[in-house]
Image (cartoon, helix red, strand yellow):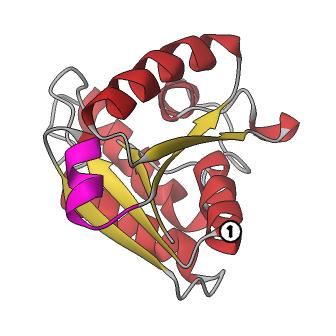
Amino acid sequence: MIACYPGTFDPITVGHCDIIIRAAKKFDKVVVLIMQNPKKHCMFTPEERKQMIEESIREYHLDNVEVAIGSGLTVKYAKKIGADALIRGIRAVSDYEYELQQATANLHLEEDIETLFFIAKPEYSFISSSTIKEIAANDGDISGYIPEGIRARLIEAIKKQNSGGSAR
């Protein structure tokens, strides 16, 4: 069984890592899929995000997890790689409402690919990439919210962005 866990992961958070670890225990293979969303302005390139995800999950020795970059319809990419399921994390009721719409549309497009919701652990339920970037941009402590190995990269990217330079 193959699962596809799509998202922008800009940057990956400890909540994302928790979902990846839990999914890796349930599926033979998990593909963490970095999707390019034209509606979102990302701080990091897809290649940088791929590298950060790989670095972040390396310590967990998840031999059945790989990271890919995609665009277009997530469910079409999932079908292309032979995925049986899409994994989505749910933090709050507002996430559920959005994810339900997406899951229903995906089911209509590809009825053989199920969407499975993983409920965020309470300690991660308020963590999002956007929130972490906002905290970091205002000199807040982001320890414990993102993998330690990428914290310095995020802070440096925010400094570049705030000084008028490109984060990339």
Which region shows up in magenta? 75-83
Residue at 58%, 48% in the rendered image = 13
Q: Is residue 103 above or below residue 116?
A: above
Spot the residue most to the right: 122
Residue at 52%, 83% in the rendered image = 64
Residue at 20%, 41% in the rendered image = 36
Q: Nearer the viewer, residue 132 or 167?
A: 132
SS state under label 1: helix
**Residue 82 sits inside the magenta stretch:** yes
Q: Nearer the viewer, residue 35 or 59?
A: 35
Q: Nearer the viewer, residue 159 or 2?
A: 2
**Residue 162 sits inside the magenta stretch:** no
Magenta stretch mostly in which secondary structure? helix
Residue 168: image location, x then y, percent: 17, 49
Residue at 15%, 36% in the rendered image = 165
Q: How many marks?
A: 1
Instruction: Give the amino acid at mark 1.
Output: Lys
Quadrant in the picture for residue 135: top right
Say left or right for 18 vs 3: right
Residue 100: image location, x then y, percent: 52, 20
Say left or right for 166 vs 133: left
Residue 162: image location, x then y, percent: 30, 28
Residue 43: image location, x then y, percent: 28, 39
Q: Is residue 57 above or below residue 115?
A: below
Quick one: label 1, few (<14), some, or many (20+) residues within 10 Å? few
Say left or right for 35 vs 152: left
> Which residue matches tag 1?
26
